[in-house]
Image (tube, rainbow, N blue to C red):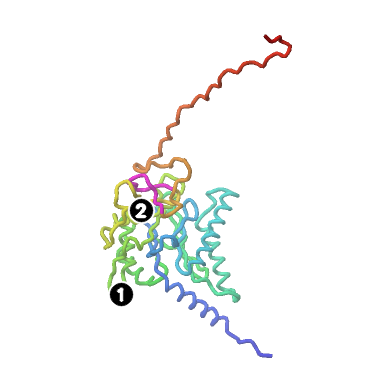
Amino acid sequence: MSMPFYVSPEQLMKDRADFARKGIARGRSVVAVQYADGVLFVSENPSQALHKVSEIYDRIAFAAVGRYNEFENLRIAGVRLADMRGYAYDRRDVTGRGLANAYAQTLGTIFSSGGEKPYEVEIFVAEIGDSAADDQLYRLTYDGQVADEHGYAVMGGAADVVASHLAEHFVAGASLEDALRVAVAALGHSESDDRVIPAGDLEVAALDRTRTQPRKFLRLREARLAEVLGDRGTAPSDAGTDAGTGSDAVDANGGVGRHQGGVDDPSDPTDQVSGAVAPLEDPVSGEPAAEPPVAPPVAPPVAPPVAPPADPDQPRG
């Protein structure tokens, strides 16, 4: 009978950590920046269907880097946990700290287990409050460690190089446009040279506390990015340049930040307004939308008079 190969616990944990770090470093970086009205997420992601940044609940967002199938499972589990807790108790009981703790327990259990490989993921969980001082940003690593970040944070890819650029150019309390420019410049920064990332290769989303809707998650589309970042060497699409055919920023609930023609982005089914329900906000002014006009009632058609049935006892002529 052969003896099993022995590996010390220290060496086993080191090997698992190296394996997870190498897998995460192969992905593209994700930047989270706190600005005056919320938290901004920026990532280089050419795919229009596989999102790295998503909404979890009303004021909570999720961002990840690494293996897509693994962090997508974590995202779905977080959405289910938030919905169940909000339904069973109250929507105010769903917090970013509670979700971060749940993710930390899951990642820590998987990492310390010898039966399966560790998850090659890192996660951001962000929640915005009524003011900038109440905003929370948590970073979770592959082994379940939780860090409370302030100002900005970077994960995946060349995180050290991107973070060094942010440390030099980050300004607290900046506007959304200024924070976006700094984040995109940091993603394109490298030790050798700086490159320009086309607007079509960027995935940008934000938690914006100024939105009147309860759901604060907002996606910035290519037309809006091109407007903020300027000409980045790519020709804008017809849907983004022709007046009345495109939208600049569309959120996951059908709300529009800057709208040109009243048409939502057809590339994302979550951006469509379902049925005939009017939007909660006016697409131009951002004010609550007026109730749609009610058509006057239509009188039902009047049936022609019908003769009474004949009496069988009545004599006929």
Question: Residue 36 — which label?
Answer: 2
Question: Residue 191 — which label?
Answer: 1
Query: In the orientation shown, which residue stands out farthest toward the right?
Result: 313
Question: Residue 18 — which label?
Answer: none
Question: Quadrant location of the N terminus?
Answer: bottom right
Most common secondary structure along the magenta stretch: loop
Residue for point 45% across, 72% down: 24
Q: Is residue 258 magenta?
A: yes
Q: Is 216 placed above or below 195 here?
A: above
Query: In the orientation shown, which residue stands out farthest toward the bottom?
Result: 1
From this viewpoint, is residue 231 visible?
yes
Query: In the orientation shown, which residue stands out farthest toward the front?
Result: 317
Q: Residues within 10 Å of mark 2 (few under 14, many from 20)?
A: some
Q: Residues within 10 Å of mark 1 (few under 14, many from 20)?
A: few
Residue 181 lies, in percent from the top left, at 30, 60
| Stretch of the chain drawn in magenta | 254-266
Disc 2 or 1, which lies upstream in sequence? 2
SS under mark 2: loop
Q: Is 241 placed above or below 117 here?
A: above
Residue for point 35% across, 69% down: 162
Residue 62 lies, in percent from the top left, at 47, 59
Whether label 2 touches label 1, CB < 8 Å = no
> Label 2 to label 1, Cα distance in Å?
30 Å
SS under mark 1: loop
Residue 186 lies, in percent from the top left, at 32, 66
Q: Is residue 138 left or right of residue 87?
A: left
Residue 120 lies, in percent from the top left, at 49, 71
